[in-house]
Image (spheres, rainbow, N blue to C red):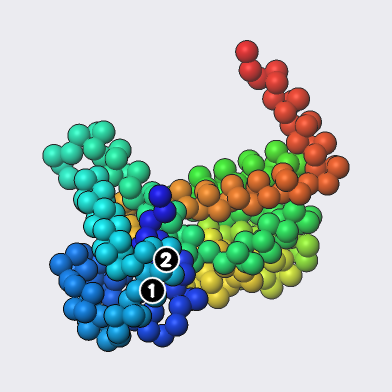
Amino acid sequence: MESILHKIRFSFDLMGPAEKKIANYLLDHTGEIISLSISEFAAHCDCGNATVVRFSRRLGLEGYQELKLRIAAELNAASSIGGEINREDGCYEIFQKRINDIYDSLKNTETVLDPDALNKVAQAVMRADRIVIFGLGNSAAIAQDAAHKFLRLGLSAQSCCDNHLQAIVASHLRRGSVAIGISHSGSSKDIVDALRLCKICGATTVCITNHGSSPIVDASDIALFTKSDETKHSILAMSSRIAQLAILDSIYTYIVLNADKASRQAIYNTEIALQSKKY
């Protein structure tokens, strides 16, 4: 069953002014709705009872009572496995909490990822003469994974996870190339500098970063956003890493499904070449 809170975030831009007041109140004071009557809730949102009912029906619910029940159920489910990881948790409890964090990260990313931007990047990668993916530290593994996937498709792809190499490679890119910079913070100086140089040289620049304004967005022609509220136990931005992988996997799958004859042959050749590596 789809999360009601996720539905609210996803539908927010389509709502009228009064409905947006309700949505903002719910997202900022989620737990308070449980004890409020419809009139009390409407007063908090500065709207009428009928607007609250219309808001509930927009979400596919019968009315206010069902909205309360669904939110209560979500809060109970989240409290059973959510919360901060602490020393008293067993490894399996930590596993459950990590799953909850990852789920939230993916659902939140869905609300900020621009479908048109994602399509543009997939098509640019598919047509590119050369693809370079920049990543440092925690993002290096994401860059390497992306390059590996694109290579399997017969594309000319390379991951650059050394800041000197990034500057060298960036200086040689030209129009028709695609450079992808991965940085959760959006403030990794070496990644931003590499993308800026790529842009000067005429390459299409793309960033995968957490939602919001940051230097890497300014250096990019196209921005693909994740949305992850990392907590203190996620110092390596673990949840956002899964969201980054999901974006790149979507691009890879799009290319597989839309590949021309030469690309399909490359995929086949890759599988044949790897057969001897398995028992």
Q: Amino acid at mark 1?
A: Phe
Q: Residue at x 34, y 80 (%)?
A: 50
Image coords of residue 102 (percent x, y) = 38, 49
Q: Which mark is residue 265?
A: none
Front residue of 101 and 196? 101
Above or below residue 242? Residue 33 is below
What x and y, as percent, mark residue 76? 22, 51
Residues at marks 2 and 1 touching, judged by CB atoms closer than 8 Å: yes
Above or below, comparing residue 180 to residue 197 in the picture = above
Distance between mark 2 and mark 1 Cα atoms: 7 Å
User: Mark 2 packing: few (<14 Cα in 10 Å), some, or many (20+)?
Assistant: some
Q: Residue furthest right?
A: 261
Q: Which residue is mark 1?
A: 55
The quadrant of the rendering that contains the C terminus is top right
The residue under the point 70% across, 18% down is: 276
- Pointer 2: what residue? 59
173 vs 251: above or below: below
Is residue 35 shown left or right of residue 117? left
Residue 195 can be seen, yes or no: no
Q: Residue furthest top?
A: 279
Q: Please indicate whether residue 83 sits to the left or right of residue 8 in the image.
A: left
Which residue is rendered at x = 65% and y = 19% of the image? Answer: 277
Residue 102 seen by the camera: yes
Q: x, y (%) of residue 234? A: 31, 51
Secondary structure under the numbered disc 2 in the rendered image: loop
Tag 2: residue type? Leu
Residue at 41% from the left image edge and 85% from the top image edge: 17
Number of numbered callouts drawn: 2
Q: Residues within 10 Å of mark 1 (few under 14, many from 20)?
A: many
* Left or right of 180 on screen, residue 189: left
